[in-house]
Amino acid sequence: MKNKERIESFIDFLCSSSRYGTFTESSRTDPLHLSHDTWRKELMKIQNPKKLLWERVKNFVRPKTGYLIADDTILDKPFGKNIECVGFHHSGKHKRVVREICLITLLWTDGTLSFPIDFRIYHNSDTRSKNDHLRDMLTVAKHRGFSPKMTMFDSWYSANETLRLLQRWKWKYMVGLKSNRSIEFRVGRYDRVKTTLSRFTIPEEGFLFSLNKVGLHRCFARYASHTRTRYWCTNHTHMTKTLWNTLKRISFRIETYHKNLKQYSLVERCQSRRADLQRAYIALILCALVKMKRLCRKRKKSISDYQRELFRKVIERYRHPPSFYT
């Protein structure tokens, strides 16, 4: 069995396994009875996991259209203190700082289909920030021929360097902003006022202002409560409120993707201590999720229905003849 065939076999194992994603369990269910060290060595041979993911999804995406969305998610590793790429990050699930892997993903979507095209792992001791990783992924996407309708990410990634990079490429973007972001707008003919977003009330149709050291943008706001307001800005200065609401719904697809990733895959189950094996395993998990999505799309079913059907016959075997398990 060649390396590609073994990688495909491991992806099939990840698609069909409901709970365990270890090399040992893969060897126990392998038709050729290969040892767990064999599967470990196969993953160690993967030199570029990000390229492996791109080779898997490049035939399913349309680089000249669609949207690019970036965000990070946290993979729980409460007992993995010896794993190289594990660090302490704030978890929205636990509402505190816990030991986890921070996975940054660049997602392509056309509004219906969604596929991950690139990913990075961020560590606290990493010399590169999250914004550096995002710019790296966007640069790779640019070299692969992507020219999306809109690029979207939250306020954590809205650094001036990132926005200027997208402006240099003449890409449209819609990004979140922190409430303390400095803005400048004109009052009357000559006067300019400098303030922060938290001190200014944004009208429903948006407001034109100059973002500090970046340029002219249109800002929208959603007033969730008296104490919390979320802001978005875009270099598409003629954007309407209707278009903004549509793009906001599209950008939420990455949250749905993260939910499917954690609920229907074994992305948090790798027990290897080496960072390269963790990256290779995550890449294969993303490939397995892409394969499941393609099968579900073809059969016009959800991922949950796919997994139910996968184990329905096994459950039926246990229930039909009682002598099978007695």
Image (cartoon, rainbow, N blue to C red):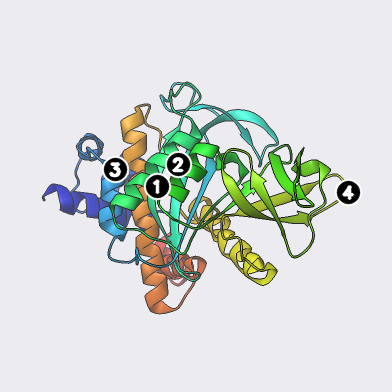
Q: Is residue 305 left or right of residue 145?
A: right
Q: Is residue 110 above or below residue 13?
A: below
Amino acid carrying mark 3 in the image: Pro
Q: Secondary structure at mark 4?
A: loop
**Sequence-first tag of 3 and 1:** 3
Label of residue 134 in the image: 2
- Quick one: label 4, few (<14), some, or many (20+) residues within 10 Å? few
For the point 38% across and 60% down, which residue is it? 147
Residue beneath disc 3: 49
- Quick one: label 3, few (<14), some, or many (20+) residues within 10 Å? many
Amino acid carrying mark 1 in the image: Leu
Q: Nearer the viewer, residue 60 or 294?
A: 60
**Sequence-first tag of 4 and 2:** 2
Q: Separation of disc 2 and disc 1 at Cα?
A: 6 Å
Q: Is residue 282 left or right of residue 47?
A: right
Residue beneath disc 4: 226
